[in-house]
Amino acid sequence: MDNEHTANAEKKIDNNANISVQESDFDKEGWKPKLESEIVDYFIRDMEQDIIKLGQSKGKFGGGKRSIWKQTQKKTKEGNKPKFSTMVVIGNRNGYVGLGRGKAKETVPAREKAIRDAKLNVISVKRGCGSWECGCREGHSIPFKVLGKCGSVKVELMPAPKGSGLVVEDECKRLLRLAGIKDIYSKTFGQIGTKVNLAQACFNALKELSKTKIREEDIKKLGII
């Protein structure tokens, strides 16, 4: 009996040793999927891009035109070190859209970073006709009202009948056009002069369309695609 107990104990020790070795060899970071922007180019063709005007160029008497570059400077002993940031929207005008932001010491690398980030943030947007004034069951608007937040900015998107157009702030129009939405009503709250938060809030509102569960009978009724 004593010999059997000792043999069983030795087997348990060997099994524990093997398990500990396997756990130590396991790479916790290597198993995670690697996202590449080229994957989006392969699966979603005909992607268009547009740049949001989030900065302001210098002008006389303190004024200036809106610019696609937001410039910041760092004071050092060697002098000023500027950095440029930009925000890019990509989409195929048929239900897929992405929003990304890039920052670099020069303008071209910043734009490339923003395009790469936008491709990794591509989402599918549900479209339909949720307006009681229309009822055409086509995907020209959104099926129901959604709300998006970012910072102090809130953007509320509401279905609109055919022919209404995009009744929304100009920078949000760029996002909605590339998503394939033609008619929409909206409300905005907060500091909408901060275009970065405004665009992100609109993008977050579009995300809510996919998070909401919809019954099959409502999918046919609202013409959701």
Image (tube, rainbow, N blue to C red):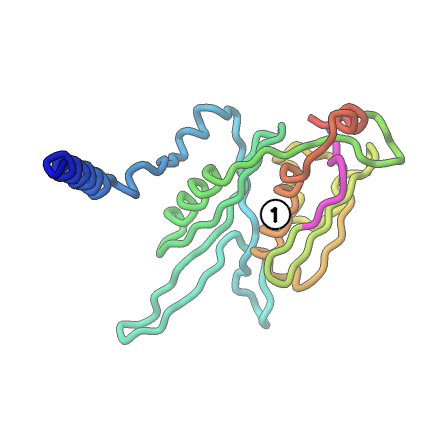
Q: Is mark 1 on a helix, strand or loop?
A: helix
On whether residue 145 falls in the magenta region, the answer is yes
Figure quadrant of residue 135:
top right
Residue ID at (40%, 51%)? 107
The magenta stretch is 138-147
Q: Is residue 205 visible in this depiction of the protein?
A: yes
Residue 33, position as x, y percentages in the image: 36, 35
Residue 143, position as x, y percentages in the image: 75, 35
Rate crowding at label 1 as few (under 14), some (14 to 19) or many (20 or more) other CA atoms within 10 Å. some
Say whether residue 153 is left or right of residue 143: left
On whether residue 137 falls in the magenta region, the answer is no
Observer-nearest of 173 and 7? 7
Residue 81, position as x, y percentages in the image: 34, 66
Say whether residue 188 is left or right of residue 120: right
Q: In which quarter of the image is the N terminus?
A: top left
Residue ID at (14%, 34%)? 4
Observer-nearest of 140 and 225? 225
Question: Which residue was labeled with disc 1?
Answer: 204
